[in-house]
Image (cartoon, rainbow, N blue to C red):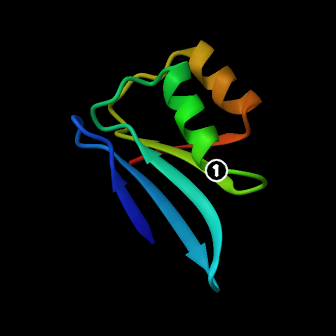
Amino acid sequence: MRWLPLPPFDDWIIHVSSNGHEAAVIVTANQMFLSENLVALLVDNAAGRLIKIVATPEVREVEDEMLEILKSSSIHLLLY
C-alpha cells in the first residue's frame, strides 16, 4: 500500500497493490466534502480498470445525487 496525504485535510489517497500490480485506489473523505471534485480526484488517480473506492464515516449523510455520481463513475462507497 502507498499512502499519499491530501493536505490541509486529514485525508488520504491510498494505492493498494496485489502481487506487485496496482489493484485499487481509495480516497478517504474524513474531512473533505463529497463532491464532483473528489470524484475527479479519484478517477484521475485510478487509471484503467482499477477498483475505485471512496471511504467516509458512516455518520456522514450522502446525498442521492452524489450516490448517482459515484454509481455512474463505477466508484464504490465504503462507510466505516
Amino acid type indicated by mark 1: Ala
Residue 73 falls in image quadrant: top right
Q: Is residue 50 left or right of residue 38?
A: right
Viewer-nearest residue: 8 or 65? 8
Q: Is residue 40 left or right of residue 26?
A: right
Residue 51 coordinates in the image, percent (x, y): 67, 55
In the depicted structure, whether residue 70 falls above or below residue 68: below
Q: Dot 1: within a 10 Å radius of its alpha carbon, few (fewer than 14), some, or many (20 or more) residues?
A: some
Q: Residue at x 77, y 52 (%)?
A: 48
In the depicted structure, whether residue 21 falls above or below residue 33: below
Residue 47 coordinates in the image, percent (x, y): 70, 51
In the depicted structure, whether residue 25 falls above or below residue 75: below
Q: Residue at x 41, y 22 (%)?
A: 61
Q: Is residue 4 left or right of residue 44?
A: left
Count of marks placed on residues:
1
Residue corresponding to mark 1? 46
Residue 10 coordinates in the image, percent (x, y): 23, 42
Q: Residue at x 53, y 67 (%)?
A: 16
Viewer-nearest residue: 53 or 19? 19
Residue 80 coordinates in the image, percent (x, y): 38, 48
Viewer-nearest residue: 75 or 9? 9
Residue 70 falls in image quadrant: top right
Report helix, strand or loop for mark 1: loop
Viewer-nearest residue: 2 or 67? 2
Q: Residue at x 49, y 29 (%)?
A: 38
**Furthest residue in direction bottom, as rendered:** 19
Residue 75 falls in image quadrant: top right
**The N terminus appears in which quarter of the rendering?**
bottom left
